[in-house]
Amino acid sequence: MRWRALIISLSLLGSVNIHGEDLLLYAPFDAAADAAIARGNAANLGGLAVGFTTGMRGQAFVLRTDCRFAVERNFRPQAGTVAVWVRPHWDGAEAASHYVFCIYGQRDLPHSWAVNRFNVAFGAGRCAFTIFTSAEGKTFSVSAPVDGWKKGQWHHVAATWANVNSGKPDGEMRLYLDGALSGRVVGKQIDVGPTDTVMGIGRDQDASPDYGDADFDDLFIYGRPLTDAEIAAGVARVKAAELYDESVQPSAGPPLPGWWRMEWPFRVKVPLPAEPGAFVQCPLKVAADLTALGVNGMVNHDSVQVVEDGAKEPLPRRVADGLVEWQTPKAARGFHLYFDTHRYSVEAPLVAKRKGVQMAETPTPPPAPDYATLAYGKPWDFDDGTFSGIDQWGDKPEFLRNKKVQDGILSMDVSQDPFFIWGDMWGQVQKVGQKVAIDLDKFPVLEMKVRQSVSRAMWELYGRPGTSDHLLHHEFPVSGSGWQRLRIDLKKEA
């Protein structure tokens, strides 16, 4: 049995910090896509399963999935700054659009995409910062060339605006690349109406797949335009590899009744049914709660401990893709997740520091053997740019169009009865590339990351035991259009 647990309460030990009013949101993208500092909701409103890599400082968010934040209190249309480090997976001369930042107009407007919109995007060898006013068709834009940028190189992008909705021709827009002023618009009357309630990071806000397709690090949003000097200085300090991490000693207060260990200052309660042997997936969605408590921090994934009520030792757990996962060893009495945070402080504009406690190694489940790796020498993960040995595609070609593998992702346009098969299920494949014989006693779990273009769809899994005519069939719903990791126990569920 698999349970998706919900965190229902958050307890806190310790002190909190609040930053100056001009900083509205800061997302370090260190193993999580939430904000560490936010005036409004700090939670990433996109999907759970996201990718991270080595960043300019700490880690970076691989922008091939949705990342959205609430606009309320995290963004000011009248004046502000949006700034982020970007490492593109493409050359700057590429014609395709890649978004950095986008807010549409209020969603109930007839053409919300064409009014009251702010966006920063790359395309056709340029980076452009554009404001769509309340009058449809009237825009202001500033751009600069990036055709010399190369794939895999870090660059800094910042856009500032001032005196929007002043009612006078004193509006300003500025674009900075790598800390230098690269273009500006001044002396304009810029009138903007109500915007959408969410802002997109690394994607246009329509359904098109024009993701940033880049690594993003250190997203800052301010409620005022940073100056030329502030932006130049902040970029220079980060380029100089100024100290980012600072190790601190754990501080444990006096014992509290029922608290597992005082070195872990946070805990969340996870109630579960009394199901023996349940596999639990618990989303680490506590960013909004931490912000509400005044904590400028992110969950330190290395610190997460799963403790059964009344137990002295933690259970083995896995933390990945924004989920904590564990297997209940017996009838569950309920669980608490204990954790510490990385605390963030902004020392100067665009320059943050991270403080944290060095954690002892936490017990994790042993790595599970992978069928494809053992049978064929490599997993069915599409990382090598191939179709990973798939033998059959759809009942008809038109059911499964535009299939491709790019950046380790298999994608396709589907309709009616789409499917793909490893092996030969119905005797329709003349020559099988790889003989498939999965022993479910050795490989009982199917795990896959998926993303779909609809909010809900029914998926189906088929299996043919040996050469028999009997066909196993399992149907299951998938909800949400963001990346998510599915786990199916083939023996118990399918």
Image (cartoon, rainbow, N blue to C red):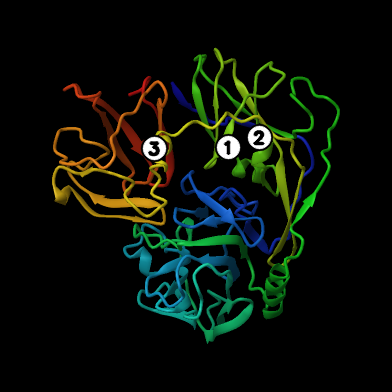
Residue 208 in picture, x, y percent from top left: 34, 60
User: Is any part of residue 104 visible from this angle?
Assistant: yes
Question: Does dot 1 land on a helix, a strand or a loop?
Answer: strand
Is 333 placed left or right of 358 in the picture? left
Q: For the residue marked with disc 3, what is the amino acid?
A: Ala
The circle on residue 252 is none
Mark 2 and mark 1 residues within 8 Å of each other at the beta carbon: yes
Question: Does dot 2 land on a helix, a strand or a loop?
Answer: loop
Q: In the image, is residue 280 above or below residue 449? A: above
Q: Nearer the viewer, mark 3 or mark 1?
A: 3
Is 381 placed left or right of 144 in the picture? left
Q: In the image, is residue 333 above or below residue 338? A: above
Depth check, front residue: 130 or 420: 420
Question: Does dot 3 land on a helix, a strand or a loop?
Answer: helix
Residue 223 in picture, x, y percent from top left: 63, 66
Residue at the bottom extreme of this rendering:
187
Q: In the image, is residue 155 above or below residue 293? A: below
The circle on residue 319 is 1
Q: Earlier in the sequence, mark 3 or mark 1?
A: 1
Estimate the spatial distance between the alpha carbons at disc 3 and disc 1, rounded to whole Å.
Answer: 23 Å
Q: Which residue is mark 2?
A: 304
Identify the residue shown where x is 54% and y is 32%. 367
Identify the residue shown where x is 57% and y is 65%. 76
Q: Nearer the viewer, mark 3 or mark 2?
A: 3
Q: Residues within 10 Å of mark 3 (few under 14, many from 20)?
A: some
Q: Quadrant of the N terminus?
A: top left
Identify the residue shown where x is 79% and y is 33%. 263
Q: Which residue is mark 3?
A: 372
Residue at the right extreme of this rendering:
254
Q: For the residue marked with disc 1, what is the amino acid?
A: Val
